[in-house]
Image (tube, rainbow, N blue to C red):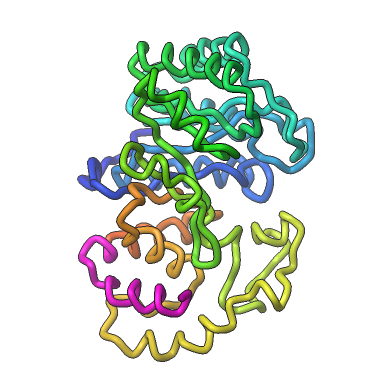
Amino acid sequence: MNIKVSQHHSIKKSVILGTAMWAWTIDNVQCFQLLDEFYAAGFRQVDTATNYPINKDPDNFRAAEDILLEWIKAHEVTDLEIIQKVGSINNLHTPEHNLSKSFLLLNLDDYRHRYGSNLHTFMIHWDNRQDKDAIGSSFEALQTATEYGLHPGLSGIKYPELYAEINREFQLDFRIEIKHNFQQSDYPRYKVFHQQAEFLAYGLNAGGMKLNPKQYTQRSGLMARGGPPTTDSFPKHLLDKLPALNEAALPIPLTSFNQIGMINAYYHPGISHLIIGPSSVFQLKDTLEFYRHLQTNAYQEIYQALQSLRD
């Protein structure tokens, strides 16, 4: 199959295709369709992790990356920019990880072999350690990754200050994934890296929250993770203000929590990229269309209004 490529590549604040729900609520065929559409639209960055999907089914350990690799081989693609998160030793949603230098280097060799030129970022996934020597050993593995031309990354770091302290010696230019949505953000917790790292936002729609509770199905991400949403978690104050926000002359009226999340991340001055998690081609097309309107600054005033709502 020949994939037609458009001209939307190399954009400053771009979108990254997330794979957290692949092989869980999104089957292989749908994953291939998402990749076909995303690639044809000119985008290249894909985010995945060894333990995706985290659905507590051992049979699905590494399933998301296996689907990605199958697609790469089927289309002989060599220009993806894959962000690979490593460290987890199962997908049971437990804190069990291995971030030793030897294990990271083993993973590094494996993913360089599996993805070839498509591997872009090698990222530590979850670290609750306080042992500086142990963390320093992990840094040595990340440094080796940079020597291969890869970008080093961090995700889910409990003590960012320790990483910043150790990085004074290594001087690595990190890409850091953070949860960032209308209800919560990890960006302030990484203050020590604000001037020296690239931030990638995930969880834009708070795990699959919808503005209309009637829209939830068993395939909805939030339901799969243990929903339904509680009354306390639902942004009623946002719903009350939505009609007023939509009175502005907007290219596309605000109809989804995903749009709110994208606005909240795109116009944030510290965030470089948005990790999206569409479950269908229809959702992906809507997301990419909305993203292109964000680039015109059409929703900048809405961003300011949303900040005042949160405050």
Question: Which residue is rendered at x = 37% and y = 66% of the image?
Answer: 263
Q: Nearer the viewer, residue 35 or 287?
A: 287
Q: The N terminus is located in which quarter?
A: top left
Image location of residue 178, percent across then percent down: 49, 47
Q: Nearer the viewer, residue 155 or 259?
A: 155
Question: Which residue is rendered at x = 51% and y = 81% of the image?
Answer: 238
Question: Which residue is rendered at x = 51% and y = 40% of the image?
Answer: 32
Residue 295 shown in magenta: yes
Image location of residue 227, percent across then percent down: 74, 63
Q: Nearer the viewer, residue 236 or 227?
A: 236
| Count of all numbered marks drawn on residues in the image | 0
Direction from residue 237 to residue 36 in the image, left or right:
left
Image location of residue 182, percent across then percent down: 50, 67
Predominant secondary structure in magenta?
helix
Image location of residue 51, percent across then percent down: 66, 33
Give the quadrant of residue 222.
Answer: bottom right
Direction from residue 291 to residue 257 in the image, left or right:
right
Residue 244 shown in magenta: no
Q: Judge whether 100 appears above or below 10 on screen.
A: above
Question: Which residue is rendered at x = 32% and y = 27% of the image?
Answer: 79
Q: Judge whether 172 appears above or below 210 on screen.
A: above
Give the quadrant of residue 292.
Answer: bottom left
Residues drawn in magenta:
293-311
Q: Judge whether 296 appears above or below 269 on screen.
A: below
